[in-house]
Amino acid sequence: MSKSTRGTTLLQSITTSSEHECMASLVGLSGGVLGRRVEIKGCLTIGRADDCDMVLTESGVSRRHARIVMVGGAHVIFDCDSRNGLFVDGQRVQSVELRDGAQIAIGECVLKYTRMNTIERVHHDSLASMSMLDALTGLANRRQVLATLVKELRGVGRGAASVSVIALDIDHFKRINDTYGHPGGDACLREIAARMTAAIRPGDTPGRVGGEEFLIVLPQTALYDALNVAARLRTVIRSTPVRFPPDEIEVRASFGVADLSEISVSGCGRDPDGVANELVAHADRLLYRAKTEGRDRIVA
Protein backbone atom coordinates (compact mmCIF):
# COMPACT_ATOMS: atom_id res chain seq x y z
CA MET A 1 0.00 0.00 0.00
CA SER A 2 1.40 3.43 -0.96
CA LYS A 3 1.95 6.22 1.56
CA SER A 4 -0.83 8.30 -0.03
CA THR A 5 -3.25 5.37 0.15
CA ARG A 6 -2.39 4.72 3.80
CA GLY A 7 -2.86 8.43 4.58
CA THR A 8 -6.25 8.47 2.86
CA THR A 9 -7.34 5.33 4.71
CA LEU A 10 -6.23 6.80 8.06
CA LEU A 11 -8.11 10.05 7.38
CA GLN A 12 -11.24 8.12 6.45
CA SER A 13 -10.90 6.05 9.64
CA ILE A 14 -10.55 9.17 11.81
CA THR A 15 -13.47 10.89 10.10
CA THR A 16 -15.71 7.82 10.39
CA SER A 17 -14.78 7.36 14.05
CA SER A 18 -15.48 11.02 14.78
CA GLU A 19 -18.87 10.86 13.10
CA HIS A 20 -19.79 7.86 15.23
CA GLU A 21 -18.84 9.74 18.41
CA CYS A 22 -21.44 12.48 18.15
CA MET A 23 -22.56 13.69 21.55
CA ALA A 24 -25.27 16.12 22.58
CA SER A 25 -24.19 19.32 24.31
CA LEU A 26 -25.56 22.61 25.55
CA VAL A 27 -23.55 25.65 24.44
CA GLY A 28 -23.96 29.06 26.06
CA LEU A 29 -24.93 31.81 23.63
CA SER A 30 -25.21 34.63 26.17
CA GLY A 31 -24.56 35.60 29.77
CA GLY A 32 -21.90 34.20 32.06
CA VAL A 33 -21.86 30.85 30.22
CA LEU A 34 -21.15 32.41 26.81
CA GLY A 35 -19.10 29.89 24.83
CA ARG A 36 -19.21 27.26 27.57
CA ARG A 37 -20.14 23.72 26.51
CA VAL A 38 -21.68 21.08 28.77
CA GLU A 39 -22.13 17.52 27.52
CA ILE A 40 -25.46 15.88 28.22
CA LYS A 41 -24.85 12.53 29.89
CA GLY A 42 -28.04 10.93 31.13
CA CYS A 43 -30.18 13.45 33.02
CA LEU A 44 -28.96 17.06 33.10
CA THR A 45 -30.37 19.70 35.48
CA ILE A 46 -30.16 23.45 34.84
CA GLY A 47 -30.64 26.18 37.42
CA ARG A 48 -29.15 28.51 40.06
CA ALA A 49 -28.51 25.81 42.67
CA ASP A 50 -24.86 24.88 43.09
CA ASP A 51 -25.62 21.16 42.68
CA CYS A 52 -27.17 21.60 39.22
CA ASP A 53 -25.23 20.08 36.32
CA MET A 54 -25.29 23.44 34.54
CA VAL A 55 -25.33 26.39 36.93
CA LEU A 56 -26.74 29.66 35.57
CA THR A 57 -26.39 32.80 37.69
CA GLU A 58 -28.35 35.19 35.46
CA SER A 59 -31.47 36.86 36.83
CA GLY A 60 -34.76 35.11 36.18
CA VAL A 61 -33.29 31.62 36.70
CA SER A 62 -34.93 29.39 39.31
CA ARG A 63 -32.95 27.13 41.65
CA ARG A 64 -33.93 24.13 39.53
CA HIS A 65 -35.27 25.59 36.37
CA ALA A 66 -35.24 22.74 33.85
CA ARG A 67 -33.98 19.23 33.25
CA ILE A 68 -33.12 17.23 30.16
CA VAL A 69 -33.70 13.49 29.99
CA MET A 70 -33.51 10.84 27.30
CA VAL A 71 -36.96 9.64 26.21
CA GLY A 72 -37.25 7.04 23.47
CA GLY A 73 -33.84 7.84 22.02
CA ALA A 74 -34.36 11.61 21.98
CA HIS A 75 -33.54 14.35 24.48
CA VAL A 76 -36.58 16.03 26.02
CA ILE A 77 -36.40 19.18 28.15
CA PHE A 78 -38.87 19.72 31.00
CA ASP A 79 -39.77 22.87 32.94
CA CYS A 80 -39.28 22.16 36.66
CA ASP A 81 -42.07 24.52 37.79
CA SER A 82 -39.81 27.52 37.25
CA ARG A 83 -41.05 30.99 38.15
CA ASN A 84 -40.30 32.63 34.78
CA GLY A 85 -40.89 29.72 32.44
CA LEU A 86 -38.93 27.75 29.86
CA PHE A 87 -38.72 28.87 26.24
CA VAL A 88 -37.51 26.81 23.27
CA ASP A 89 -37.14 28.53 19.90
CA GLY A 90 -39.23 31.44 21.17
CA GLN A 91 -42.14 29.35 22.46
CA ARG A 92 -42.96 28.80 26.13
CA VAL A 93 -43.10 25.06 26.80
CA GLN A 94 -43.63 22.62 29.66
CA SER A 95 -41.75 19.90 27.79
CA VAL A 96 -40.49 19.43 24.25
CA GLU A 97 -38.18 17.19 22.27
CA LEU A 98 -34.97 19.01 21.43
CA ARG A 99 -33.85 19.23 17.83
CA ASP A 100 -30.28 19.95 16.78
CA GLY A 101 -29.78 23.72 16.89
CA ALA A 102 -32.70 24.43 19.23
CA GLN A 103 -32.29 27.61 21.29
CA ILE A 104 -33.32 27.43 24.94
CA ALA A 105 -34.06 30.63 26.89
CA ILE A 106 -33.81 30.33 30.68
CA GLY A 107 -34.12 33.66 32.45
CA GLU A 108 -31.70 36.02 30.73
CA CYS A 109 -29.50 33.18 29.47
CA VAL A 110 -29.73 31.57 26.02
CA LEU A 111 -28.40 28.05 25.37
CA LYS A 112 -28.11 26.05 22.17
CA TYR A 113 -28.73 22.31 21.96
CA THR A 114 -26.34 20.76 19.47
CA ARG A 115 -24.76 17.47 18.53
CA MET A 116 -21.00 17.50 17.84
CA ASN A 117 -18.50 14.86 16.81
CA THR A 118 -15.08 14.63 18.43
CA ILE A 119 -13.34 17.02 16.04
CA GLU A 120 -16.11 19.61 16.41
CA ARG A 121 -16.02 19.36 20.21
CA VAL A 122 -12.24 19.82 20.34
CA HIS A 123 -12.44 22.74 17.90
CA HIS A 124 -15.22 24.44 19.87
CA ASP A 125 -13.50 23.99 23.23
CA SER A 126 -10.22 25.35 21.85
CA LEU A 127 -11.91 28.46 20.48
CA ALA A 128 -13.86 28.96 23.71
CA SER A 129 -10.68 28.70 25.75
CA MET A 130 -8.83 31.17 23.53
CA SER A 131 -11.71 33.65 23.75
CA MET A 132 -11.38 33.73 27.56
CA LEU A 133 -7.60 34.06 27.86
CA ASP A 134 -5.04 36.79 27.28
CA ALA A 135 -2.72 35.47 24.59
CA LEU A 136 0.49 36.95 26.05
CA THR A 137 0.15 36.01 29.74
CA GLY A 138 -2.30 33.10 29.71
CA LEU A 139 -4.41 34.87 32.36
CA ALA A 140 -8.12 35.51 32.01
CA ASN A 141 -8.84 38.40 29.66
CA ARG A 142 -10.87 41.44 30.64
CA ARG A 143 -14.22 39.98 29.60
CA GLN A 144 -13.63 36.74 31.49
CA VAL A 145 -12.34 38.27 34.74
CA LEU A 146 -15.28 40.69 34.83
CA ALA A 147 -17.71 37.83 34.18
CA THR A 148 -16.11 36.01 37.12
CA LEU A 149 -16.61 39.06 39.31
CA VAL A 150 -20.28 39.31 38.34
CA LYS A 151 -20.75 35.62 39.14
CA GLU A 152 -19.20 36.07 42.60
CA LEU A 153 -21.38 39.13 43.26
CA ARG A 154 -24.47 37.08 42.49
CA GLY A 155 -23.22 34.66 45.14
CA VAL A 156 -23.11 37.53 47.63
CA GLY A 157 -26.76 38.16 46.83
CA ARG A 158 -27.49 34.55 47.83
CA GLY A 159 -25.77 34.90 51.20
CA ALA A 160 -22.10 34.25 50.41
CA ALA A 161 -19.38 36.30 52.11
CA SER A 162 -17.96 39.52 50.67
CA VAL A 163 -15.95 39.91 47.46
CA SER A 164 -12.77 41.97 47.08
CA VAL A 165 -10.76 43.05 44.05
CA ILE A 166 -7.15 44.10 43.58
CA ALA A 167 -6.24 46.47 40.74
CA LEU A 168 -2.53 46.23 39.93
CA ASP A 169 -0.47 48.31 37.51
CA ILE A 170 3.25 47.94 36.68
CA ASP A 171 5.08 51.17 37.51
CA HIS A 172 6.94 53.08 34.78
CA PHE A 173 6.07 50.45 32.19
CA LYS A 174 6.62 52.89 29.32
CA ARG A 175 10.18 53.39 30.58
CA ILE A 176 10.69 49.60 30.51
CA ASN A 177 9.47 49.46 26.90
CA ASP A 178 11.61 52.44 25.90
CA THR A 179 14.73 50.94 27.52
CA TYR A 180 14.42 47.26 26.60
CA GLY A 181 11.97 47.37 23.71
CA HIS A 182 8.58 45.68 23.54
CA PRO A 183 10.13 42.20 23.89
CA GLY A 184 11.47 43.31 27.27
CA GLY A 185 8.08 44.68 28.25
CA ASP A 186 6.42 41.43 27.17
CA ALA A 187 8.92 39.44 29.23
CA CYS A 188 7.98 41.49 32.29
CA LEU A 189 4.26 41.00 31.73
CA ARG A 190 4.65 37.22 31.36
CA GLU A 191 6.87 36.94 34.44
CA ILE A 192 4.62 39.11 36.62
CA ALA A 193 1.61 37.06 35.53
CA ALA A 194 3.44 33.85 36.48
CA ARG A 195 4.46 35.21 39.88
CA MET A 196 0.94 36.47 40.49
CA THR A 197 -0.58 33.08 39.68
CA ALA A 198 1.84 31.34 42.04
CA ALA A 199 1.25 33.81 44.89
CA ILE A 200 -2.55 34.02 45.01
CA ARG A 201 -4.88 31.52 46.64
CA PRO A 202 -6.84 28.71 45.01
CA GLY A 203 -10.14 30.18 43.88
CA ASP A 204 -8.79 33.68 43.22
CA THR A 205 -8.98 34.78 39.57
CA PRO A 206 -6.27 37.00 38.06
CA GLY A 207 -6.80 38.70 34.72
CA ARG A 208 -5.04 41.14 32.43
CA VAL A 209 -7.43 44.02 31.77
CA GLY A 210 -5.16 46.49 29.97
CA GLY A 211 -1.63 46.96 28.67
CA GLU A 212 0.15 46.71 32.02
CA GLU A 213 -2.90 46.57 34.29
CA PHE A 214 -4.25 43.50 36.04
CA LEU A 215 -7.35 42.75 38.10
CA ILE A 216 -7.67 39.98 40.66
CA VAL A 217 -11.06 38.78 41.92
CA LEU A 218 -10.99 37.40 45.48
CA PRO A 219 -14.24 35.61 46.38
CA GLN A 220 -15.41 35.33 49.98
CA THR A 221 -12.71 37.79 51.01
CA ALA A 222 -13.00 40.87 53.22
CA LEU A 223 -10.73 43.88 52.89
CA TYR A 224 -8.20 42.84 55.56
CA ASP A 225 -7.49 39.51 53.87
CA ALA A 226 -7.36 41.16 50.45
CA LEU A 227 -4.70 43.53 51.76
CA ASN A 228 -2.63 40.54 52.88
CA VAL A 229 -2.85 39.08 49.37
CA ALA A 230 -1.81 42.42 47.85
CA ALA A 231 1.16 42.67 50.24
CA ARG A 232 2.29 39.19 49.23
CA LEU A 233 2.01 40.11 45.54
CA ARG A 234 3.99 43.32 46.03
CA THR A 235 6.76 41.33 47.72
CA VAL A 236 7.04 38.64 45.03
CA ILE A 237 7.02 41.24 42.25
CA ARG A 238 9.78 43.42 43.69
CA SER A 239 11.90 40.66 45.28
CA THR A 240 13.70 39.44 42.14
CA PRO A 241 14.47 41.26 38.85
CA VAL A 242 12.95 39.89 35.67
CA ARG A 243 15.61 38.13 33.61
CA PHE A 244 15.86 39.44 30.03
CA PRO A 245 19.32 38.25 28.90
CA PRO A 246 21.77 39.82 29.07
CA ASP A 247 19.82 42.24 31.30
CA GLU A 248 17.82 42.04 34.49
CA ILE A 249 14.82 44.37 34.80
CA GLU A 250 13.73 45.78 38.14
CA VAL A 251 9.93 45.81 38.33
CA ARG A 252 7.66 47.57 40.80
CA ALA A 253 3.87 47.78 40.94
CA SER A 254 1.11 49.86 42.51
CA PHE A 255 -2.09 48.43 43.97
CA GLY A 256 -5.65 49.53 44.67
CA VAL A 257 -7.65 47.19 46.93
CA ALA A 258 -11.42 47.42 47.41
CA ASP A 259 -14.29 45.34 48.76
CA LEU A 260 -18.05 45.70 48.82
CA SER A 261 -18.09 47.44 52.20
CA GLU A 262 -16.40 50.46 50.60
CA ILE A 263 -19.08 51.20 48.05
CA SER A 264 -22.63 52.30 48.67
CA VAL A 265 -24.32 48.99 47.86
CA SER A 266 -24.40 45.58 49.50
CA GLY A 267 -24.24 43.63 46.24
CA CYS A 268 -27.70 42.22 46.88
CA GLY A 269 -30.17 44.89 45.87
CA ARG A 270 -28.75 46.03 42.53
CA ASP A 271 -27.79 44.59 39.17
CA PRO A 272 -24.51 42.66 39.69
CA ASP A 273 -23.09 44.09 36.46
CA GLY A 274 -23.53 47.61 37.81
CA VAL A 275 -22.08 46.63 41.18
CA ALA A 276 -19.08 45.03 39.44
CA ASN A 277 -18.40 48.19 37.43
CA GLU A 278 -18.65 50.34 40.58
CA LEU A 279 -16.34 48.06 42.56
CA VAL A 280 -13.70 47.99 39.80
CA ALA A 281 -13.97 51.78 39.35
CA HIS A 282 -13.36 52.24 43.08
CA ALA A 283 -10.29 49.96 42.95
CA ASP A 284 -9.03 51.97 39.97
CA ARG A 285 -9.40 55.21 41.93
CA LEU A 286 -7.38 53.72 44.77
CA LEU A 287 -4.76 52.54 42.26
CA TYR A 288 -4.52 56.07 40.89
CA ARG A 289 -3.92 57.34 44.44
CA ALA A 290 -1.11 54.80 44.84
CA LYS A 291 0.45 56.17 41.66
CA THR A 292 0.16 59.81 42.67
CA GLU A 293 1.46 59.13 46.19
CA GLY A 294 4.74 57.73 44.89
CA ARG A 295 4.08 54.29 43.32
CA ASP A 296 5.26 50.88 44.58
CA ARG A 297 2.60 50.88 47.28
CA ILE A 298 -0.84 49.58 48.27
CA VAL A 299 -3.81 51.88 48.83
CA ALA A 300 -7.16 50.76 50.25
Image (tube, helix red, strand yellow):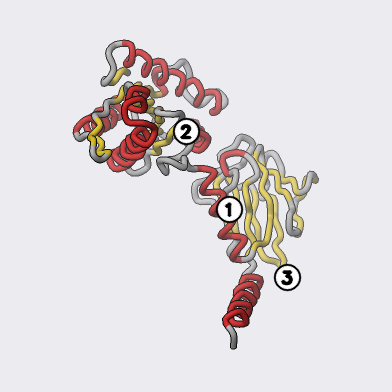
Name the image quarter holding the N terminus: bottom right
Residue bearing mark 1: 37
Instruction: Estimate the spatial distance between the alpha carbons at disc 3 and disc 1, rounded to whole Å.
Output: 24 Å
Labelled pair 3, 2 in contact (Cβ < 8 Å):
no
Quadrant into which the C terminus falls: top left
Would residue 158 be visible to someone looking at this image?
A: no
12 left or right of 227 in image: right
Please give the residue where the numbered disc 3 appears in the rendered image.
72
* N-term mark: 2 or 1: 1
**Which residue is under mark 2?**
149
- 211 w.r.t. 135: above or below: above
Residue displayed at 59% across by 37% down: 58
* Viewer-side label of 3, 1: 1
- Direction from residue 60 to residue 251 in the image, left or right: left
Task: Pick the residue in front: 40 or 21.
Answer: 21
Q: Give coordinates of residue 109: x percent, y percent.
A: 65, 41
Mark 3 and mark 2 lie on one chain; the one further toward the N terminus is: 3
Q: Can residue 57 be seen in this view?
A: yes
Three-letter code for the amino acid on which mark 2 is drawn:
Leu
Q: Earlier in the sequence, mark 3 or mark 1?
A: 1
Spatial CA span between label 3 and label 2: 41 Å
Residue at 64% over, 40% down: 30
Dot 2: within a 10 Å radius of its alpha carbon, few (fewer than 14), some, or many (20 or more) residues? many
Residue 299 relative to residue 124: left or right: left
Tell me where residue 44 appears, x and y as whole percent.
Answer: 60, 57
Total count of labels: 3
- Comparing 257 with 215, the one in front is 215
Q: What residue type is labelled 1?
A: Arg
Q: In which quarter of the image is residue 216?
A: top left
Q: Is residue 217 above or below residue 94?
A: above
